[in-house]
Amino acid sequence: MVIAALVLVWIEKIAILGWILNLTGFIVSIVANSQIKKSMGRLTGKGWAVAGIVLSCVLFGLFLIIVIAAGALIGSILGGMGGF
């Protein structure tokens, strides 16, 4: 789910679907990790759950960096034009 989100966020028309999948993948990974801990060894896949959490956080971090950079670029363009 998170890997699909990683691909979809770069497609302009359906980027919002990628972000929804990213959030869903993050929530599902946290729930899975919690259930694995509570199962006392009956369930496996902790590595996959942790990977889902980490990839979701990395993708969200990239999103924040892009938004901040875009804001700075727009601010510098508007500032160079004498404001808005």
Image (spheres, rainbow, N blue to C red):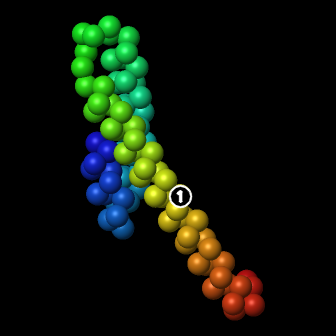
Picture quarter containing residue 24? top left
Residue 13: horizontal and vertical position, in percent?
35, 65
Residue at 36 percent across and 67 percent down: it is 12
SS label for mark 1: helix
What is the number of callouts on the image?
A: 1
Q: Could you tell me residue 25's position as x and y percent?
A: 36, 38
Q: Nearer the viewer, residue 27 or 57?
A: 57
Specify the farthest residue to the bottom: 81
Q: Position of residue 52 (x, y in %)?
A: 34, 38
The answer to whether residue 71 of the structure is visible from this angle is yes
Along the horizontal axis of the image, is 60 left or right of 2? right
Residue occupied by mark 1: 64
Name above or below for residue 53 compared with residue 35: below
Identify residue type, mark 1.
Answer: Leu
Label 1 neighbour load within 10 Å: few <14, some 14-19, many 20+: few
Residue at 62 percent across and 74 percent down: it is 72
Left or right: where 14 falls relative to 69: left
**At 53% from the left edge and 58% from the top edge, which residue is drawn?**
64
Kindly identify the residue that appears in the image at 36 percent across and 53 percent down: 18
In this rendering, the answer to whether 22 lies above or below 47 is below
Tell me the quadrant of the picture where the C terminus can be found: bottom right
**Foreground of the two, 60 or 82:** 60
Q: Is residue 15 above or below residue 72?
A: above
Indicate the quadrant containing the N terminus: top left, top right, bottom left or bottom right.
Answer: top left
Residue 24 seen in render: no
Percent across and percent down for residue 63 are 48, 58
